[in-house]
Amino acid sequence: MDFTGRDFLQILDFSSDELRYMLEVAKIFKNYKKTGQSHKYFPDKNIVLLFEKTSTRTRCSFEVAGHDLGIGVTYLDPTGSQMGHKESIADTAQVLAKLYDGIEYRGFAQKTVNDLAKYSSVPVWNGLTDYCHPTQALADFMTIEEYFGSLSGLTVAYLGDTRNNVANSLMAMSAKMGVNYIACGPTALKPDSGLLKKCQAVAAENGSTITITSDLQALSDTADVVYTDVWLSMGEDKSKWGERIKQLKPYQVTMKVMDLAKPTTIFMHPLPSFHDLETAVGRDVYEEYGLNELEVTNEVFTSERSLVFEEAENRMHTIKAIIYLTLKDKE
Ligand code: CP
Ligand code: NVA
């Protein structure tokens, strides 16, 4: 299995075996971290984190993973570089590749991260674009496997905006791992047909299915994981809140939805989440639309069935595996 020098741009770029291997390496790193075993393998390497959108988990995971591996880490915030404003992506990529051993990018267009990879001679890691969030999907599957002990025969149901970045990567990862995937939401927000076709073909090869539906009953007695994400993603205009609430309120994850699935069903969310009024955005939406919980109720979010903080922790272990595998010398 050779990852050295490769980019991490989207889940579909990797084979099932390669993704499985990344999960295995992440498990080893998690164990090292828990047992205090030092793994500073790259004291002479440096990486740069380019963020054109805000972040807590992704930024901190790359920073901590980098430090744990002995790597020097530079963080550039959404206003902190010339990229896009005064310098092209091609020029930025070539400059950064002269200084750094790896580049993480979070931003808008998938084309930007693809172009960074095209013009850079060092690995580029996608920390979220409008199209996908592949490091999230890896952490999600690590969490699911840890909880159930195996991925075999499981069904993941995603409720809400089923064509957003997180859903796209979750669908692709489900297909690669041979896990059944149900995208449940309004037809106006259904997954891109090209991506869906590709994922359905991969799922078929791996013995699983992908179902697109507007009917919540599809979860009944089937979903082992109920997954949701925000109803309005970063970069989408605030003026869309009214329309989204109308479209997605029927797909809010409530205890009733959890109970419709199975008694053993768990809840997952990439975070951040609007499950109470403890955020400025949550309060603004409440004032305008009167909803005090959005994509998930506080009852589900805070319940024993919620694995959201385990999931957040696994972002770091899986990101560390990606950095390690792509930076290490060829064997
Ligand atoms: N889940 C996730 O990507 O979180 P951040 O936006 O905080 O990085
Ligand atoms: N869909 C969300 C994910 C955040 C981690 C967004 O893009 O804002």
Image: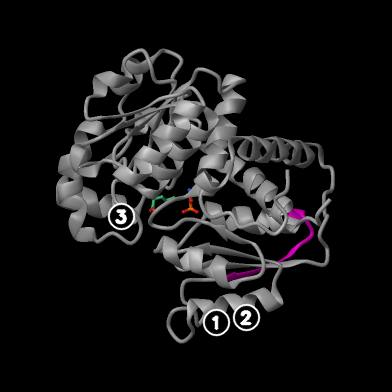
Mark 2: few/some/many CA within 10 Å (<14, 14-19, 20+): few
Residue 216 appears in which quarter of the rendering? top left
> What is the number of the mark on residue 95?
2
Residue occupying the point 62% across, 80% down:
95
Residue located beneath label 1 in the image: 91
How did the renderer colour the structure?
one colour
Q: Nearer the viewer, residue 302 or 9?
A: 9
Q: Nearer the viewer, residue 24 or 64?
A: 24
- For the N terminus, the quadrant is top right
Label 3 CB, ligand 2: below 8 Å?
A: no
Magenta range is: 68-75
- Residue 123: x, y in percent? 64, 62
Q: Would residue 53 be seen by someone viewing this image from the given angle?
A: no
Q: Residue furthest bottom?
A: 86
Viewer-side label of 3, 1:
1
Q: Nearer the viewer, residue 245 or 23?
A: 23
